[in-house]
Amino acid sequence: MAQIPKALTLVRQRAPKIQGKPASNSPVARVLVDTGVFHLDQEFDFLVPEELSEQAIPGVSVRVPFNGRKCEGYIVGRANSSAHVGRMQYIDKVNNETPLLTASILNLSRAVARKYASNIMDVLRFAIPVSMSSVKKVVCSYSDQRSINKDLIKDYPQSYFDSLQNGEASHVIWTPLPTTEPFELLAEICKIRSGGVLVLVPDAKSVERCLKVFMGSGIGKNILTWSSELTKSQRYSNYLEILNGSAQIVIGVRGAIFLPIQALSLIVVWDEGNDNFSEIRSPGWHAREVAIERTRQDGCALILGSFSPSLVATRYLLSGWLKPLHPPREVFREFSPKFIGISELSSPDQRGRISTKAWKTIQKGLQSGPVLIQVPLRGYIRSLVCQTCANHARCQCGGKLIIASVKKNVVCGLCGVFQSDWQCHYCAGKTFRHSGIGDERTLEEIGKAFPGTTIRSSNQASMILDEIRDSCIVLATPGSEPRARNGYSAIIFLDSRVFLERATVNAEEQARLNWFSVSALASLNGEVFLDVVSTDPNFQALLRWDPWHSATRDLLERSDLQLPPQFKAISVIGPHADIHSMALEFSKKYLISSLQSTDDVYLSKIILRASDQHGQGLVDDLLNYCRIRSAHGLTALKVRVDPIEL
């Protein structure tokens, strides 16, 4: 039977929605609305219905009518009157009766938005989790309290621990001893410091390791974690627990910097130079910089820790805002492993990808414990060059040719096309030479050289999470090195020049951080081999275990070259014509690079630079420029303040 269609209703026949009457007390709510429009980054006034007056309190999430559609937002205040002229809209709905946005997080988000030329709602998306209808019960981790282990803090200045106990807001850059577990000292610091403590670590693996060490140290406080391993429901439940003040210590990744920890007294950023602390999504904030801003707003203490300080942290150190915290030089010499480099490249025992010295170091290390071998590249053969002219072998599409697996098939790394009859465009040669050897090929070579020895592979795809206890060879890529229970008896860095030859201004800084951090995994009497010339200044820094001198030298060079962090740098990507006109306008006040190409043929890129005293002025001018473009309906530009790579 056919359905009878409903009668049409004209627009003028629809009855207007009855809004009710405004609240008798403070009827006006100031709401931060997620409009999705860049230049509308402000508070808007709405009327609060009487029936929602008790629920519509500052910090709650609401739904409001805006420009003919429904938008989400947060109430930031209530008032008796409004400066708005004309008819005001009513709040539609209170999404969550629990105020998730606190005043301190709001102020922090405003500061971050201004620092990174962004809209505040883009920052609040990282600060506040998605609300869930059902809340699971959260049980904080707790261990019985133990007394302070004085053996762990004896090598550091006692005056610092006295300042922690007295509640002073000290700011330090901490360099722990090599061959030690840094989280053990952090656990003792958490025992001494009262109030809330936030510990930021680079990844979820470090969160679990830190929690394990803290539980074993007997801190005697409630501990919660915050990482990407949590589900949305778990994140929301943990957020509410932290908001209620139940958690005294929070261990988390970069997003934890926005958590509303009650009575926050100390922020710790471990491995502060790690790239994982930089948010890849807009607005591209860095957890270290947000931690520094929160320290200034909340008046709490700060610890930036790393085996090799970043140039940004070194800059704060030279300015006097950060103070050094590390044992005396003679103590470092006692704990530092023995380093072996290449003295003369022409020597027969030091030639080849894996030199005789490296083989001997592996053989000697296996006699007393596990051996770690780090390879910077993943895969089998990551690049091929012509045997005759040494130019990179490329496909017709422009991609580099690689050998993707042990089957030894030559394919294009970009389009994946099989190459059976390749010929060099420069010299017409038809033979290859391997130039970028990955971990799979290295595993094959090591397996043939050490038959009967257990070899374990660890990379980002299949990472070893447990501690290494038995004598074996561990082959790892950067960032996936597992820890050994008693340290590695030998550590070998292969293809070390790959780090130094990267086409970025922070290549040496990242190489130094990698070498110091991995070398710290060695045992007390372990040996570390690097296939770099021993006269290299970064190798000399390892030899003395002195990362501060090298970082200071690099920082002073950046001043002469007008490079970050001594100069503020901002990368901007957009359509060719828009970027060209922008470069002409900003070149009157600031340093502008020439137009650069991007992966998209329709987009160009420029780098804006300004001195430190004019750095925030550059950011403010760029923010206003983007708002004007948004108001005129022009294409949004992709802005990245303080990019980690240039």
Image: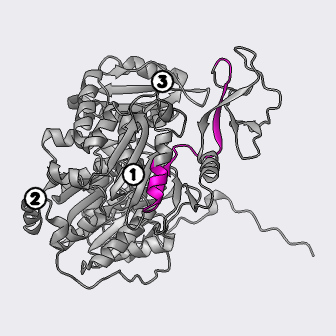
- Point 73% across, 20% down: residue: 424
**Residue 348 position in % (x across, y down):** 50, 31
**Residue 323 position in % (x across, y down):** 14, 49
Indicate whether 377 appears above or below 297.
above
- Residue where numbered disc 1 is placed: 518
**Residue 3 position in % (x across, y down):** 86, 72
Label 3 Cα neighbours within 10 Å, binned few <14 / some 14-19 / many ≥20: some
Q: How far apart in space, not on screen, are marks 1 and 3 (Cα)?
A: 42 Å
Residue 341: quarter of image: top left
Label 1 Cα neighbours within 10 Å, binned few <14 / some 14-19 / many ≥20: many
| First-in-chain label (2 vs 3) | 2
Amino acid type, mark 2: Pro
Q: Relative to residue 113, is residue 407 drawn left or right?
A: right
- Residue where numbered disc 2 is placed: 157
Q: How far apart in space, not on screen, are marks 1 and 2 (Cα)?
A: 26 Å
Contact check, label 1 and label 2, Cβ < 8 Å: no
- Residue where numbered disc 3 is placed: 579
- The answer to which of 397 and 357 lies nearer the viewer is 357
- The answer to which of 571 and 524 lies nearer the viewer is 524
Indicate whether 633 appears above or below 223.
above
Amino acid type, mark 1: Val
What SS does tag 2 mark? loop
Amino acid type, mark 3: Ile
Query: Magenta span covers which residues?
Result: 361-389
**Residue 594 position in % (x across, y down):** 44, 18
* Magenta stretch encompasses residue 599: no
Q: Relative to residue 136, is residue 424 drawn left or right?
A: right
User: Which label belongs to residue 549?
Assistant: none
Q: Residue furthest right?
A: 1
* Magenta stretch encompasses residue 387: yes
| First-in-chain label (1 vs 2) | 2
